[in-house]
Amino acid sequence: MHAVYEACGFGFSLQRNLTALGIKCYVVCPQKLDERNKRVKTDGLDAKALCLKLDRFVQGNRDALARVRVPSEAEEQLRAIHRQREQLVGARKRLEAQGRSLMVNHGVEPVKNWWKPRTFAALAAPQWMKELLQNSQPILIALQEKISTLTAQLQSVRRPRSTA
């Protein structure tokens, strides 16, 4: 028995579970499956197109499927840590930019890393502005702590070698 599905945001647990059941499961690159360009997209049409490609692949046409390498569970966990770190960095950058924007909009020279304790203590801004910035400062400090923890975690783990 064979199965195929397009790689997506759901990870590779389906492939692992089917393989554990003895089903030969392939994961392929997401692709435009409307070869006749009818501009009709349905799950049924996509499933049919994938099954036809799978049939050609099983019959020996190794070019019929654009397979992707299925990462190990450890590699997927590292990816999840990396993605979370990147999301936290994005959140920190947005909050930092909001603070700098407040400064610029009210004629205060924007300061890089304004939220760090020493920099914040020396910040030449009116009290009302500092009070507003203090709403974000503890969040930024907490985000930076989490980012540092995840960075150290990623650096301490040696990435496994690819076995394609």
Image (cartoon, grey):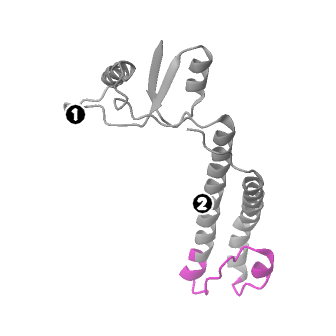
Q: Is residue 93 left or right of residue 47?
A: right
Q: Which residues are magenta?
A: 101-126
Q: Earlier in the sequence, mark 1 or mark 2?
A: 1
Q: Nearer the viewer, residue 28 or 95?
A: 28
Q: Where does residue 147 sit, x and y in percent of width and height?
A: 72, 59
Q: Where does residue 44 sit, x and y in percent of width and height?
A: 33, 20
Q: Where does residue 114 sit, x and y in percent of width and height?
A: 69, 77
Q: Is residue 51 left or right of residue 18?
A: left
Q: Magenta stretch: residue 124 in it? A: yes
Secondary structure mostly seen in the magenta stretch: loop
Q: Looking at the rendering, which quadrant does residue 65 occupy? A: top left
Q: Is residue 82 left or right of residue 15?
A: right
Q: Magenta stretch: residue 147 in it? A: no
Tell me if mark 1 has few (under 14), some (14-19) or many (20+) residues whose alpha carbon lies within 10 angstroms of its own.
few
- Tell me what residue is drawn at x 35 percent, y 37 percent: 31
Q: Nearer the viewer, residue 103 or 82?
A: 82
- Pointer 1: what residue? 39
Q: Amino acid at mark 1?
A: Arg
Q: Nearer the viewer, residue 126 or 121?
A: 121
Element carrying mark 2: helix
Circles 1 and 2, Cβ within 8 Å, touching? The answer is no
Q: Is residue 105 left or right of residue 5?
A: right
Q: Nearer the viewer, residue 52 or 13?
A: 52
As measured in the structure, the alpha-carbon distance from the residue carrying label 1 to the one carrying label 2 is 36 Å
- Tell me what residue is drawn at x 60 percent, y 14 percent: 21
Q: Looking at the rendering, which quadrant does residue 10 occupy? A: top right
Q: Amino acid at mark 2?
A: Gly
- Pointer 2: what residue? 90
Q: Looking at the rendering, which quadrant does residue 126 occupy? A: bottom right
